[in-house]
């Protein structure tokens, strides 16, 4: 299994914090967001990484290589990161879809036990935080079997089970379908969409499961208030669980 981390974006919604350095390099406690992700994966037995870079890519590459050896990581460059989104960044990785992989948005801070939630199955799984959502969150609609019937922002919050937190496991059986749907979207000049747009197209052809987060601490850092919450409430919860 490998980890695929999408870290090309600038983090413009963070204001000045998003301009000083790549957002994934912001420290929460003693570690940067992306170092926390990488260290968690290493402790989980994942030693093969794919990282999509764009904004200040040389700075971010050097930061990542503080933890990883060069033969442990493949850097994929998104030269048009300013005008594309996660759909295009993930499409750039398509030739590296060779086995099951854990997907991360690079702005997700979480406790290390999160990866234990994935089942040892042949089904792709998306971690769900069960809560009331607003318009901005990526939402999941599920059935009684936890099968996903919709993923994305464009749905009424009252119809969803909660938020997709930006961590997923893609199973080997779904990788060709994922590649095909990403390519279909890029061919239609839809590369400025979130990758969930392409995933939504997969739902009629495969089963994708939602996995509840079981109230483990996790936050996507988009806005200054998210960063403040990550550095205080979420970090303290992670520390209290002993898995920072």
Image: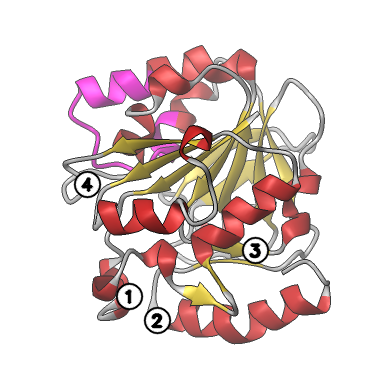
The residue tagged 3 is: 110
The residue tagged 4 is: 81
> Would you say 185 lies left or right of 162 here?
left
In front here: 188 or 93? 93
Where residue 224 is drawn, which disc sits there?
2
Number of residues whose C-alpha sits closer than 10 Å to that of mark 4, classed few (under 14), some (14–19) or many (20 or more)? many
For the residues labelled 4 and 1, the Cα–Cα distance comes to 17 Å
For the residues labelled 4 and 3, the Cα–Cα distance comes to 25 Å
For the residues labelled 4 and 2, the Cα–Cα distance comes to 22 Å
The residue tagged 1 is: 14
> Would you say 5 lies left or right of 148 here?
left
Return the x and y of residue 17 as percentages of the image width and height: 32, 78
Return the x and y of residue 207 as percentages of the image width and height: 65, 23
For the residues labelled 1 and 3, the Cα–Cα distance comes to 19 Å
Which quadrant would the N terminus be assigned to in this image? top right
Q: Label 3: state its secondary structure.
A: strand
Q: Are marks 4 and 1 in contact (CB under 8 Å)?
A: no
* Residue occupying the point 37% across, 66% down: 23
Of the image marks 1 and 3, the number of the one nearer the N terminus: 1
For the residues labelled 2 and 1, the Cα–Cα distance comes to 5 Å
Of the image marks 2 and 1, the number of the one nearer the N terminus: 1
Q: Are marks 1 and 3 in contact (CB under 8 Å)?
A: no
* Residue occupying the point 55% across, 15% down: 205
Where residue 36 is drawn, which disc sits there?
none
Q: Is residue 162 above or below residue 224?
A: above
For the residues labelled 2 and 3, the Cα–Cα distance comes to 17 Å
Number of residues whose C-alpha sits closer than 10 Å to that of mark 1, classed few (under 14), some (14–19) or many (20 or more)? some
Of the image marks 4 and 3, the number of the one nearer the N terminus: 4
Q: Are marks 4 and 3 in contact (CB under 8 Å)?
A: no
* Residue occupying the point 64% across, 63% down: 110
Q: Are marks 2 and 1 in contact (CB under 8 Å)?
A: yes
């Amino acid at each position: 299994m490998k980890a695929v981390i999408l870290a090309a974006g600038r983090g413009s919604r963070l204001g000045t914090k998003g301009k000083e350095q790549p957002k994934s390099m912001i420290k929460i406690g003693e570690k940067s967001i992306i170092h926390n992700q990488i260290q968690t994966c290493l402790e989980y037995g994942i030693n093969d990484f794919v990282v999509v870079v764009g904004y200040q890519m040389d700075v971010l590459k050097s930061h990542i290589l503080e933890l990883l050896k060069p033969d442990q990581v493949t850097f994929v460059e998104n030269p048009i990161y300013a005008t594309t989104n996660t759909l295009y960044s993930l499409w750039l990785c398509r030739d590296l879809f060779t086995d099951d992989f854990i997907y991360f948005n690079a702005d997700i801070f979480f406790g290390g036990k999160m990866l234990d939630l994935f089942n040892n199955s042949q089904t792709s799984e998306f971690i769900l935080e069960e809560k009331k959502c607003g318009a901005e969150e990526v939402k999941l609609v599920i059935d009684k079997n936890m099968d996903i019937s919709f993923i994305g922002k464009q749905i009424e919050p009252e119809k969803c089970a909660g938020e997709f937190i930006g961590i997923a496991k893609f199973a080997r059986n779904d990788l060709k379908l994922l590649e095909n749907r990403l390519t279909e979207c890029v061919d239609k000049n839809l590369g400025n969409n979130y990758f969930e747009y392409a995933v939504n197209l997969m739902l009629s052809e495969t089963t994708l499961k939602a996995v509840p987060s079981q109230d483990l601490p996790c936050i996507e850092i988009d806005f200054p208030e998210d960063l403040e919450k990550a550095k205080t409430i979420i970090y303290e919860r992670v520390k209290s669980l002993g898995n920072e």
